[in-house]
Amino acid sequence: MPQRPSPRLEVRGLSFRYGDHQALRAVSFAVGRGECLGLLGPNGAGKTTLLQVLTGMVGLQEGEILLEGERLRPAQGQFRAALGVVFQRPSLDGKLTARENLELGAELFAVPRAERRRRAQELLSFSDLAERADERIERFSEGMKRRLEIARALVHRPKLLLMDEPTQGLDEGAFQRVWARLHGLKRSEGLAIVLATHRADEADQCDRLAILHHGEMLALETPDALRSRVGGDLVVVEASRLEELAGILSERFAVAPQLDARSLWFEAPRAHELVPRLVEVLPAGRLRSIAVRRPTLADGFLKVTGAALEQSS
């Protein structure tokens, strides 16, 4: 029987502490060739700390990191040469042009001189910046700079791309184009991606999701599996005096409504059949709207963690 290839990246029992604060608790996962793993969680979940450990920005305190089966420390040159990194904070030189930023990145990763200009031109096209190649990037919009950051992380053809909230500032069209091209690199070059995000639409681009909450990994599954945790469609009710309505619904229909400032919602296996009955029993004049929708990744995250995805923690 042929031996299965080692994962591109494997993390085993990684823990990290800032003083008295336990930022990561025994996190383990593996990422295969051509796979995108999303680290999904709100601010404070441990996503950025995990990427900081993987990139060597903070030291490895506890656990193991393996690159293609070989145990390495993030500070080792062999590990760093295999990585492309997109941080949350800008790292480009505003006084340089887009082309110069890419060629400088190529030089830092020892890309042969003869290849640097060709590789820079490829990535200018990748990022839709070919027509602005020789302008200083201090004149660029935030979205243009973000696209260039992603392109520069790819300049040396890394085996593994680590990205922290990579599409901040991108409009919907740029978001879709960037992801279409990253998926193309996954297929053509076997690029593995680890992505930290709190955005459900970005998490949907991933093959699997690691659900992080207060430094713990609570689940590791596909986006569809996370959505299926909800167990049915969601009924969303906008009305006045929501707490009173929640009590009525709980008593009459054996559901468990959740509330925010404007609405309540609950899971229902046959939601469309339930709606007419809800309209009959809810007090007249109190109901503003009632809708049925499919579960989202944010709903699945709430089901796993008990916390809202966008909520800071």
Image (cartoon, grey):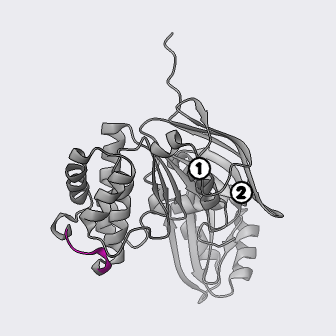
Please identify the quadrant where the C terminus is shown. bottom right
- The secondary structure that dominates the magenta segment is loop
In front of the other: 258 or 66:
66
* Numbered tag placed on residue 127 in the rendering: none
Q: Is residue 140 left or right of residue 42?
A: left
Q: Residue 160 location, x and y as percent?
A: 46, 44
Q: Residue 305: x, y in percent?
A: 70, 59
The front one of 241 and 156 is 156
Q: Position of residue 157 (x, y in %)?
A: 35, 44
- Give the quadrant of residue 123: bottom left
Total of numbered circles in the picture? 2
Q: Is residue 250 left or right of residue 151?
A: right
Residue identifier under label 1: 54
Q: Give the farthest residue toward the left.
A: 131
What distance separates the C-alpha of mark 1 from that of mark 2? 15 Å
Question: Residue at horizontal 73%, vertical 62%?
Answer: 254
Question: Which range of residues does the magenta coloring cover?
Answer: 134-138
Residue 115's quadrant in the figure? Answer: top left
Mark 1 falls on what kind of element?
Answer: helix
Q: Position of residue 90 (x, y in %)?
A: 44, 70
Give the residue type at disc 1.
Leu
Q: Which mark is residue 215?
A: 2
Q: Residue at x 69, y 48 (%)?
A: 60
Name above or below for residue 5 compared with residue 148: above
Residue 218 position (above or below residue 279): above
